[in-house]
Amino acid sequence: MKSVLSIILVLLLVGCGQVSGEYLTEKNQDQFSLPVMSSNDSFLSFKWIEQGYNGIFSPIQANIEHSMDKVMERLGEPRAQGHHEGGVYWEYEQATYFFDPHTNKGVAIAINVEEHQLTSEEMRKQLGTPDQSELNEMHGYWMFVYKLKNYELVFEAKSEKDILTYAWLRKANKH
């Protein structure tokens, strides 16, 4: 009797996983959606660096320099919006977009990566050694920065040894 119940439970769980996977595949065909990955794929890969050189934020396949109109057309109304460091931000479920208020063009995109439980060691293994690694005293996060010519790929953690909490692709400051 126990073995029959165990088999039924396993079949039920497997079936639910397949339905969920099919839904994700259909839902994530849009350019701004998180890509669907097989269990063999790593969330973080060197593609983040390669695409970052062209202003594409790899995990969501979005160009950071899209206009506000283009983002609104693709994603609809943001769930929250406001001002941050002199710019405008729009928060969506999967990402937060930051815009220059003078040009209405994107200057950065940030995503929460905490659920992936990535460490700085895993980041270095996938992407190499960051160009900068330092405490951002203003925001209280440890930052790992990869300089990509006109852009920067940034990872934030609560401390140097903690799991990564946020990932950003942003326009580089031209000083």
Image: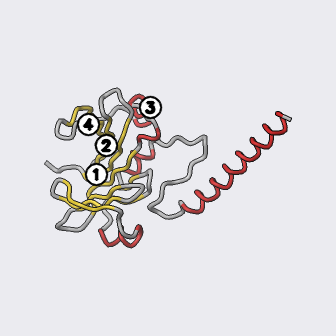
Label whose residue precedes the other's in the sequence (4 or 3): 3
Residue occupying image coordinates x 45% and y 46%:
47
Work out which quarter of the rendered image holds the N terminus and state it: top right
Q: Residue at x 52, y 54 (%)?
A: 35
Compared to residue 139, the image places residue 67 above or below, namely below
Number of residue marks: 4
Circle 4 residue: 141
- Say what amino acid the circle numbered 2 marks: Val
Q: Amino acid at mark 3?
A: Glu
Instruction: Identify the residue under disc 2.
Output: 154
In this figure, which residue is indicated by the disc labeled 1? 170
What is the secondary structure assignment of the residue under circle 2?
strand
Residues under numbered marks 3 and 2 in contact, where contact means CB atoms less than 8 Å apart: no
For numbered disc 1, what is the local secondary structure?
Answer: strand
Q: Give the residue pinned by disc 3.
A: 122
At x 28%, y 35%, the residue is 131
Is disc 3 placed on a helix, strand or loop? helix
